[in-house]
Image (cartoon, rainbow, N blue to C red):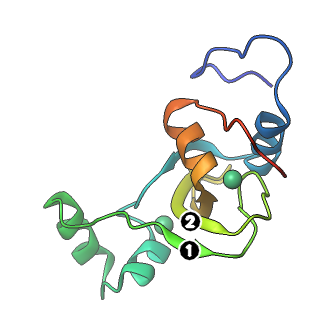
Amino acid sequence: MSNPTRPAAPGNPSAFAIAVESGLTGLKAVSTGTCPGCEICRADLGFDTVAKLEAAYEAGKVVDEPFFSQSPCECCGSRLGGDREAAHGIESDGSIAHFHVCVDCALYLANGDEPENWEG
Ligand SMILES: [Zn+2]
Ligand SMILES: [Zn+2]
């Protein structure tokens, strides 16, 4: 499957790129950070309603704080504990998928940078 938003990597895709691709199967428009329309972000950040989250988000008052977790990354599947950030994609039915990604995936989704020492 080709991804028109990113130039093809030279040579074969890395184990990391393959893991990410399979972790994100079926999701479109994946991006990291808080999504102001997301119910799970609302609950995670302690807002009463999505409208309040949206207002705070638009005022620049929502800070994306990574949190520490020992759970596997929900994107590349890395089992190393570490910082996780919220990320979102759009499911095939149009709903928002909320998941958490490791810092390697956050960088990759933001810039296309692959980690040098990734262990799945
Ligand atoms: Zn969310
Ligand atoms: Zn990851």
Tell me if 81 is positioned left or right of 79 in this view.
left
Q: Mark 2 is on which residue type?
A: Asp
Residue at the image position 82 percent from the left and 44 percent from the top: 19
33 sits to left or right of 4? left
**Residue nearer the viewer, 119 or 37:** 119
- Residue kind at label 1, given as amino acid type: Phe
Residue at image location 62% in from the left, 47% down from the top: 104
Residue 33 quadrant = bottom left
Residue 69 picture location, percent across and down: 63, 75
Report how far apart the C-alphas of labels 2 and 1 lie in the structure.
Answer: 4 Å
Q: Is mark 2 within 8 Å of ligand 2?
A: no
Q: Earlier in the sequence, mark 2 or mark 1?
A: 1
Q: Residue furthest top?
A: 10
Quadrant (top left, top right, bottom left, bottom right) of the N terminus:
top right
Mark 1, Cα crowd under 10 Å, few <14 / some 14-19 / many 20+, is few
Q: Is residue 46 above or below residue 51?
A: below
Residue at 18%, 68% (x, y): give it.
Answer: 55
Horizontal relation, residue 93 to residue 52: left or right = right
Residue 20 vertical position relative to residue 44 in the rendered view, above or below: above
Q: Looking at the image, do the residues carrying marks 2 and 1 touch, with CB atoms under 8 Å apart? A: yes
Task: Choose between 39 and 41: the one closer to the eye.
Answer: 41
Determine which residue is flagged by label 2.
83
Vertical order, 29 against 103 (above or below): above
Mark number, residue 68? 1
Q: Nearer the viewer, residue 97 or 69?
A: 69
Classify mark 2: helix, strand or loop.
Answer: strand
Q: Secondary structure at mark 1?
A: strand
Front residue (pair 80, 28): 80
Residue at image location 18% in from the left, 58% down from the top: 58
Q: Which residue extends farthest front?
A: 117
